[in-house]
Amino acid sequence: MKKADVVEAFTILKTATPHPKSDLNYRSPFELLVAVVLSAQATDVGVNKATPALFAEADTPEKMAALGEDRIRHHIRSIGLYNNKAKSVYKLSQILVERFDSTVPGDRKSLESLPGVGRKTANVVLNVAFNQPTMAVDTHVFRVSHRLGLAKGKTPTAVEKELVRVIPETFMDHAHHWLIKHGRYVCKARKPECEKCIISQLCPSKLQG
C-alpha cells in the first residue's frame, strides 16, 4: 500500500472511531494485564464473562496472590487453557508484589519477564495502560495487514515491525485497535464483509476479488 493510501485508510478509520477502546473489561492496569493474559486463544466475550467475579475477589496483585491458584482456576474454568492461565496469573501476581511494588511495570522487558506475558500481551498493556505507540499483532491484525498490503511479514513480529515502519506516528496511539476491530467485525477470516468496509476502495484484495 502506498504511503498516501496508508494515511487515507487510517484517516477514515480514525474519523469513524476517534477513540477506540479494548473490548476487554478492566478498571486498572493490573486488571487489564490479567484480562489480556486470559484472552490468549480465547474470546474477549468469554474473558469478560469470567473476570467480574474474579476481580470482585481480587483486583490487586496482593489480593490475587492471596486468592491462590485453585480459587483463580475456579473463576476462570470457562476459559480455554484455564489451568495454565491460573498458574500464570497467580505467579505474575506474586512477582508484581515481590519485585515491582505491586505495580504493573511500564516497560517491555519487565512485562515480558512475567509468566504468561509475551510480546503481544506486553504491547497491548504498553499501548492501552501506558499510552505507548506499540503495535500488538494478533490473528486479526495479521490478516488485515496482509489483505490491505500494509505488511507482508510471515510472522507476527515481522508484521509488527513493518506496521510500525509504515504507519505514521500520528495514528500509532490507536492503530492496533482500529486494525483489530476491523478484522474482528468487518474483514473477517472466512467471509470478509467487503460491502461494509469503509476502506474497501483502498484494498488490493477487494480490487482483485
Image (cartoon, rainbow, N blue to C red):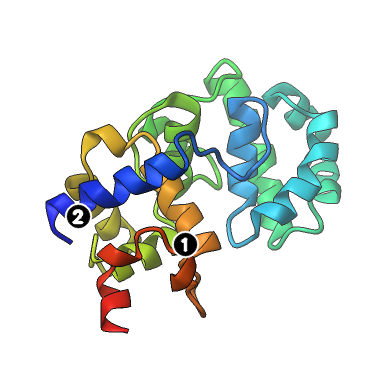
User: The C terminus lies in which quarter of the figure?
Assistant: bottom left
Type of amino acid at the residue the image marks with label 2: Asp
Q: Can residue 61 be seen in this view?
A: yes
The residue where tag 1 is placed is: 183
The first of marks 2 and 1 along the sequence is 2
Q: In this view, does 104 lie above or below 134?
A: above
Residue furthest to the bottom: 209
Percent position of residue 49, x then y: 79, 49
Q: Which residue corresponds to the image point at 50% horizontal and 53% vertical from the top-left?
A: 181
Looking at the image, residue 79 lies above or below residue 168: below
Residue carrying label 2: 5
Looking at the rendered structure, the kind of residue marked 1 is Gly
Near-viewer residue (189 or 14): 14
**Left/right of residue 98 with respect to residue 125 in the rendered view:** right
Left or right of 106? Residue 33 is: right
**Residue 123, quarter of picture:** top left
Look at the numbered disc 2 and give the secondary structure of its residue.
helix
Where 88 sits versus 173, above or below? below
